[in-house]
Amino acid sequence: MSDLLYLEDLEVGQKFTSPTHALDATQIKAFAREFDPQPFHTDEAAAKSTFFGGLAASGWHTAAITMKLLASTKPGIAGGLIGAGGEIAWPQPTRPDDVLQVTSEILEVKPSRSKPERGMAVMRSETKNQRGEVLQILTSRLIVPRRHPG
């Protein structure tokens, strides 16, 4: 298999596994201070009395790490991971000392009728911690180039 996948290379049921990313409290607080400054993301003591009962990463931090891991997964998608929409859910919080890894599965592959040079793939990605707990579910529609338009 080549380093890059085109629409013709994708098939329903195909699975991919990313590298890992170790997360710690310092990363969680730094991201939150800049992008999601809420006490349950920035202050361990204050977080204890919140819904989360302790420090939790922003869902957007989990999403950003997921994107980094998806972009690092080999083989990659030709032309990059170009999103055309999707759905995201965070079934449980990401915590300090979690080691994140993404497993993805192709759910649908469809050539475009109006743009023969590309098509659409639907991919479900689960971001899990080292205990196998699902922290994020991302179902995304990706624009994928065709190797042989037509």
Image (cartoon, rainbow, N blue to C red):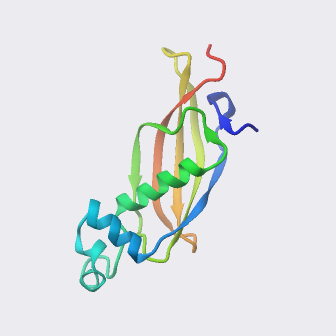
Residue 35, picture quadrant: bottom left
Residue sitting nearer the eye, 117 or 141 = 117
Q: On screen, 139 above or below 29?
A: above
Examine the rendered structure and indicate whether residue 120 appears above or below residue 60: above
**Image coords of residue 5 (percent x, y):** 65, 35
How far from the left and from the top, in percent, is residue 74? 66, 47
Q: Is residue 98 left or right of residue 85?
A: right
Q: Compared with residue 73, is residue 111 higher up or lower down, i.e. above or below?
A: above
Q: Left of 121 or right of it: where is 13?
A: right
Most distant residue in the right direction: 1
Residue 134: x and y in percent read 50, 65
Corner quadrant of residue 136? bottom left
Residue drawn at point x = 63 percent, y = 30 percent: 6
Residue shown at the point (36%, 61%) measured from the top left: 59
In front of the other: 10 or 26: 26
Q: How many numbered discs?
A: 0
Please state if 87 lies on the left or on the right of 122 as rendered: left
Quadrant that contains the N terminus: top right
Q: Which residue is found at the position 46% from the left and 56% from the top?
A: 137
In the displayed structure, 132 sits above or below 142; it is: below
Q: Can you give x and y, in whole percent of width and height, for residue 26 in the image?
A: 39, 75
Quarter of the image with the C terminus in it: top right
Viewer-proximal residue, 71 or 103?
Answer: 71
